[in-house]
Amino acid sequence: MSRIRMFEEISLNSWPAIDSRFRDGWIIRYAGGYTNRANSVYPLYETFEALNCKIEEVKNFYNSRGLPPMFKLTSDSKPACLDNVLGELGFEEKDRALVMTKIIAGQSCDLSDLDVLSSPEDRWLELFFSLNRRARENQVLAKRLLTLLPPKSTFVLLKKKREFVGCGFAVIQSAFLGLFGIAVRETERRKGYGREMTEKLLEVGRKRGAKIAYLQVDEPNISAISLYSKIGFHEEYQYWYRVGE
């Protein structure tokens, strides 16, 4: 198995969809339109049927649900020609992102100012929705998907001077720790809290047996890529979406 496919399989579990269907090597996901990852096709495995017919099926699947057809692609997508074929059919490339990984190692850090929760409690949701516009506009779906996360998921709040300044969550699957939703209040930015939360989430994962951390960051977000690189993350691979009508 390629490392790309391995991390793509892990990402399927780390952000579940409401409806997932397997179709000749492709995984077709739907979650009411909330997040691209949960509303796109993962073409992970070898496919044998006629490509154009399968693409038409995908278009019908999403269009019947009021969404544009969307594929989440990597350099390992199957078949290898899929990206070019979708481009020729008018599917637009958008939202290229990096998957970055890091071996979890190093000294432990103080977690005394971090509230670690086993579920998305109301206080966590309140801050999460205030910092994430898309989630705030899709609260019902966001809450539903958060409840579908694997059992070892962890939700954190960073507290400074008796006030919560940032939040995030982590998903642990076997030896892998996925970091998501790390955000800091606008008034508290440029104080190093984003890095602090990331490092403390790594420590939470280390204490629970995780060995490898991963996260996803949009390619244009140079400042975030720089921050994660300083912490020790490196680019594993890139993914992007092809969106049709």
Image (spheres, rainbow, N blue to C red):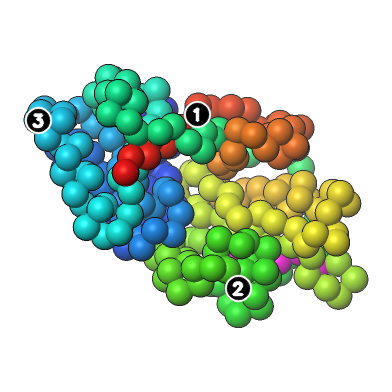
Helix, strand or loop at label 3? It is: loop
Query: Which residue is nearer to you in this view: 244 or 211?
Result: 244
Q: Residue at x 43, y 49 (%)?
A: 36
Is the magenta region chiefly helix, strand or loop? strand
Query: Is 75 placed above or below 187 here?
Result: above
State which quadrant residue 55 falls in. Answer: top left
| Pointer 1 local density, CA inside 10 Å: few below 14, some 14–19, many at least 20 | some
Q: Indicate the position of residue 75 as horizontal and vertical percent values.
A: 39, 23
Which residue is identified by label 1? Answer: 238
| Residue pictured at 16% horizontal, 44% vertical | 57
Q: How many marks?
A: 3
Mark closer to the chain start, 1 or 3: 3
Per the image, label 2 sits on a secondary structure element best described as helix
At label 3, the amino acid type is: Glu
Q: Which residue is mark 2?
A: 125
Give the position of the C terminus as an image quadrant: top left
SS for tag 1? strand
Residue extending farthest bottom? 122
Q: Is residue 69 left or right of residue 8?
A: left
Badge 2 or badge 1: first in the primary sequence: 2
* Direction from residue 156 to residue 94 in the image, left or right: left
- Magenta span of residues: 155-159
Quadrant of the rendered image containing residue 9: top left
Query: Who comes first in sequence, dot 2 or dot 3?
Result: 3
Distance between the Cα atoms at labels 2 and 3?
44 Å
| Quarter of the figure that contains the N terminus | top left
Circle 3 residue: 49
Which of labels 2 and 3 is toward the front?
3
